[in-house]
Image (cartoon, helix red, strand yellow):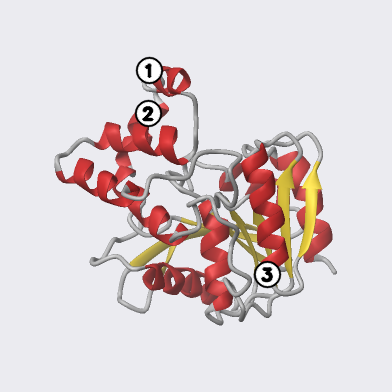
Amino acid sequence: MSTATSADGTTIAYERTGSGPAVVLVDGALSYRAAGPSGPLARELATDFTVYTYDRRGRCESGDTTPYAVQREVEDLAAVLEAAGGSPYVYGISSGAALALEAANRGVPMAGLAAYEAPFVVDATRPPVPADFLEQLRALLASGRRGDVVKLFMTQGVRVPAPFVALMQLMPAWSKLKGVAHTVPYDVEIMADGQRGRPLPADRWPDVKTPTLVIGGSKSPAWLANAARNVADVVPGAEHRVLAGQTHLVKPKALAPVLRDFFSR
């Protein structure tokens, strides 16, 4: 493990593996290096790239200087990119994709950006996230109800069926999810007002200069597929690709060839 120092002094833990051009992986909500999709994907890409994975602010071995602001997470990512050589390729999944897009829009240099299914809610194919979602989450955290934070996020944010969430609470991974429950509001802030059932405004990310590939899975719910198309429509010059047979839990072996192709142009 190595560390980078963000602009506000927060220590951000990261590790690297493989050799070749640098790629930084950005996880979504409730994920970190030791528990999330970045580890398996890093192993798939390590034959062709030097892959950097990191713990986002407040997770595992990274610090969590308060107060939180999306700009602080942009600065965290910028610090990791600097450690990776200054302008590497970036892959973000779920809310990590939204964070990476925000960083690109704010001028953080990247050689290329691949964004997988940022979970915007852009139409009526699912109910919008409640208008007071962030306030509900903060209230639960203030009363120490970390498990309820995870349950609320899973059911109202991600739309995981309640019976499945009930089963998740019996699994060993549930304690790991509760351990990073305090960072769920961070991801909600990153999504801003993009989960209200309205199309993204055309000027959501007007200053993205990075070559961008937006990816969705063919077996993902309609709301995620529609969100991916909408993101591709509003990111200047973005490409859009649908990955056959994949869901939001995309398999690294299916995703890695797409990223290799895009990052090798």
Instruction: Count residues near mark 1 (Cα–Cα under 10 Å), then give few for <14, some for 14-19, many for 20+.
Output: few
Q: Farthest residue toward the left? A: 143
x, y percentage for residue 152? Answer: 35, 35
Residue 109 falls in image quadrant: bottom right
Q: Which residue is drawn at the image coordinates 39% and 68% (left, top)?
A: 70
Looking at the rendered structure, the kind of residue marked 1 is: Leu
- Looking at the picture, tell me which residue is in the foreground, 22 or 182: 182
Q: Distance between the residues labelled 2 and 1?
A: 7 Å
Looking at the rendered structure, the kind of residue marked 2 is: Trp
The vertical placement of 72 against 57, above or below, is below
Which residue is labeled 2 in the image? 174
x, y percentage for residue 9? Answer: 30, 75
- Looking at the picture, tell me which residue is in the foreground, 30 or 23: 30
Q: Distance between the residues labelled 2 and 3?
A: 35 Å
- Label 3 SS: loop
Which residue is labeled 3 in the image? 235
Q: How far apart are marks 3 and 1 (CA)?
A: 41 Å
The vertical placement of 246 against 95, above or below, is above
